[in-house]
Amino acid sequence: MKKINLCLLIALLLAFHHSFLQAQEPEINRYPLPPEDLKTPVNIDPIDLENFVDGIMAVHIADKHIAGATFAAVKDGKILMKKGYGLTDIAKNKPVTSDKTLFRPGSISKLFTWTAVMQLYEQGKIELHKDINQYIKGFSIPETFAEPITMAHLLSHTPGFEEKSIGMAARKPKDLMPLKDFLKKHMPQRVRPPGQITSYSNYGTSLAGYIVECVSGIPFEEYIEKNIFEPLGMENSSFRQPLPDRLLENMSVGYQYKNGVLEPDEFELLNGMAPAGGLSTTGEDIAKFMIAHLQNGHYNDVEILKEETARLMHTTLFTHDRRLSGNAYGFWEWTYNGLNTIGHGGDTLLFHSYLILIPEQDLGFFVSYNSVGGSGASRVQLIESILDRYFPFSPEKEDETIEKEKKQNLYRFSGTYRSTRVNHSSIEKLGQLVSTIKINAIKGQKLLVSSGPNKSQWIQKEPLAFQKARSQDKLLFREDNKGHITHLFFGDSPTAA
């Protein structure tokens, strides 16, 4: 995030009632001491896990206005647990089943796009560090900067595109545009050189999906079906919009909570953004995909990636700082309770999901909710609760000081920081007004970080590094050669700056 004038924030808060980070998770205590050996396999009893998840889901469905959810866990190449919760259709009193009920996992779709990209990479059909214009048919990306955008930039969300959302949603199937036409018409501006700063990009992922289409010679949806779904036996999954008739009956309704009632909404159509968020799938099918990645490209006797390619996908491709979580080859890195994990979150307007893999434990979890109440806190709390149960930390006394020679004037960090994920060229740039975080120094000893109603305190650990009080979360600042603070990075948000 870049620093902007404090006066601007005051004007913003008068004009807007909430910020884009309004839905951040509530404060959750986390402890900084990991188990002694996280590489030692942990035995998870499936009955214990099911009972534990049952309890959390009962609370979520009752208290967070959620109609239904699906959950899956995999371990050592097998499905450890899969279960549906609540209802897929309230009017019909139809229960969720993990093997048949389809959910919309949003941006978890991207992992399938990146897997397809890496399949073509290992076949020698895509180079990760070459100009993507050599693969694109029908249009080209402008040469705004000296360095071209590469597939590695798309994989790591560092192509330097502005944010552009207008046109992403379609009202009716007839309004859906072909992938090429949408990407050409709605191309965002290049606003920074590639490979320097992350800015989460749906356009970038959909562009990668179109490159899969161009290189393979078949439509994106068909490529995924033939090269991922069919080999893995994912019979109840599709990127097609609208869904094929054979899957329609089992597609979960999505719900919003209005005036004390869960109200059904229509199937969400993503215009030109299928590779970034258009997947419909079941808990059981996602479990097969997780196993394939944890088994380094293999599921039973089937190979969707060579072992060396799968291992590469799970390693760091880009990070703003080695002390922070980074981006793997499409996956997000996240360290929690000392565990090195990779995964991805996913949100549509109605469905909210999370997928996490722990390669050292050959363990993975997936959850998806079919209601707005499942956003943010619910999905994260469920996963964190499971990790806390099976990989617990021990509390450590808070150390709120650093060596005298490391202490700085914390007031230099005060100000307002704007997300890099903003628009610069259209009416959407008004979103910059609310895409902000405010930082104040508290008596020069701590930082108070505010985003809308959410506030947290951070303790300095190193000259430009801070840790959230009673938490493992980190944030780092970047300064220029004159010592001026220019950027802010959160350790648990590798695709944001």
Image (cartoon, grey):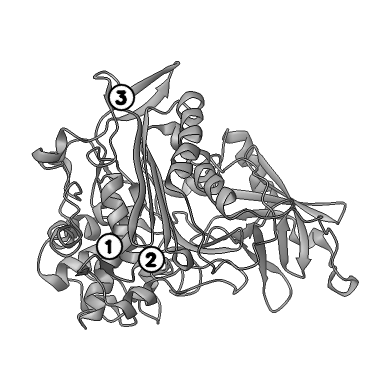
- The alpha-carbon separation of the residues under discs 3 and 2 comes to 32 Å
One can see residue 278 in this view: no
| Position of residue 19 in the picture relative to residue 283 (left or right) | right
- Residue at coordinates 37% horizontally, 72% vertically from top-left? 313
Q: Position of residue 458 (x, y in %)?
A: 74, 54
Quickly name the residue at label 3: 264
Mark 3 or 2 closer to N-term?
Answer: 3
Q: Position of residue 198 (x, y in %)?
A: 48, 65
Dot 2 lies on which element?
A: loop
Please tell me which residue lies in front, 132 or 47.
47
Dot 1 lies on which element?
A: helix
Q: Residues within 10 Å of mark 1 (few under 14, many from 20)?
A: many
Check disc 2 and give the amino acid type: Gly
- The alpha-carbon separation of the residues under discs 1 and 3 comes to 29 Å
Dot 3 lies on which element?
A: strand
Give the tally of numbered discs: 3
Residue 113: assigned label: 1
Q: Residues within 10 Å of mark 2 (few under 14, many from 20)?
A: many
Q: Position of residue 217 (x, y in %)?
A: 10, 69
